[in-house]
Image (cartoon, rainbow, N blue to C red):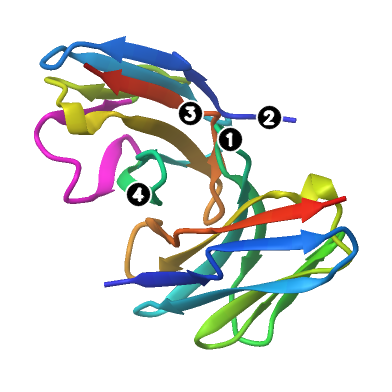
Amino acid sequence: EDQVTQSPEALRLQEGESSSLNCSYTVSGLRGLFWYRQDPGKGPEFLFTLYSAGEEKEKERLKATLTKKESFLHITAPKPEDSATYLCAVQASTNAGKSTFGDGTTLTVKP
Amino acid sequence: EPEVTQTPSHQVTQMGQEVILRCVPISNHLYFYWYRQILGQKVEFLVSFYNNEISEKSEIFDDQFSVERPDGSNFTLKIRSTKLEDSAMYFCASSPWGELFFGEGSRLTVL
């Protein structure tokens, strides 16, 4: 069974204080690892797809990296508008696109 | 920018009643999904739909659930006899291949 574990559960940062979120996963053949952002009461918003170990993707202050066992979402010089829950999800190559999600990390950035 | 739209945004129903949640996926996407999120919990896969048929379903998706694509644009989730534990946010998602594009969700409250 595919499993995704995210840490920490919650992270509070000062504006400009860089940090990283972790996503550990086990999957029977990785089709893709995905990062999403979810604001309260809203649907998840797609951020990145990573397909193989060593791959990196960047978007504004966010950078996602992937190893064979985990992924990191690095946040550089965050701003208050980066406050949200960040979700990690995996898809196995053996299924028809089903995504397994982690519990998420709730990031709060204080001005 | 194309988006997934869901209706209703909030529905309150009595236990045992039938509920239909509606979704309009992004028009050129081929894969369609329903996920749900119970308050404070992780996003859970319910069902995937491809080429006008269910491609995978979870243990949650039992006989009280059904999905349909009645025409070229709509995608529906029907819950035949709602239970208290069906109270959740239901998200429709569509995908060109891997990454998911979610709607804003339909909040279902079963009394």
Q: CA distance from mark 4 to mark 1?
A: 24 Å
Q: Chain of mark 2?
A: B
| Tag 2–tag 4 contact (CB < 8 Å) | no
**Camera-side mark, 1 or 3:** 3
Bin the neighbour count of mark 1 within 10 Å (Cα to Cα): few under 14, some 14-19, many 20 and up. few
| Tag 2–tag 1 contact (CB < 8 Å) | yes
Instruction: Give the structural element (helix, strand or loop) at label 4.
Output: strand
Q: Which residue is mark 1?
A: B28
Numbered tag placed on residue B43 in the rendering: none
**Camera-side mark, 4 or 1:** 4
Q: Chain of mark 3?
A: B
- Sequence-earlier tag: 2 or 1: 2
Q: CA distance from mark 2 to mark 4?
A: 24 Å
The quadrant of the rendering that contains the N terminus of chain A is: bottom left
Instruction: Give the structural element (helix, strand or loop) at label 1.
Output: loop
The correct choice, above or below, for A25 with respect to A77 in the image is: below
Numbered tag placed on residue B2 in the rendering: 2
Measured as percent of width and height from the top left, residue A82 is found at 77, 51
Q: Chain of mark 1?
A: B
Measured as percent of width and height from the top left, residue A30 is found at 45, 76
| Tag 4–tag 3 contact (CB < 8 Å) | no
> Residue at the spot x=61%, y=60% of the render?
A35
Bounds of the magenta span?
A: B51-68
Measured as percent of width and height from the top left, residue B66 is found at 20, 29
Q: Which residue is mark 3?
A: B105
Instruction: Give the structural element (helix, strand or loop) at label 2.
Output: loop
Residue situated in front as seen by the camera: B63 or B55: B63
> Residue at the spot x=34%, y=79% of the render?
A28
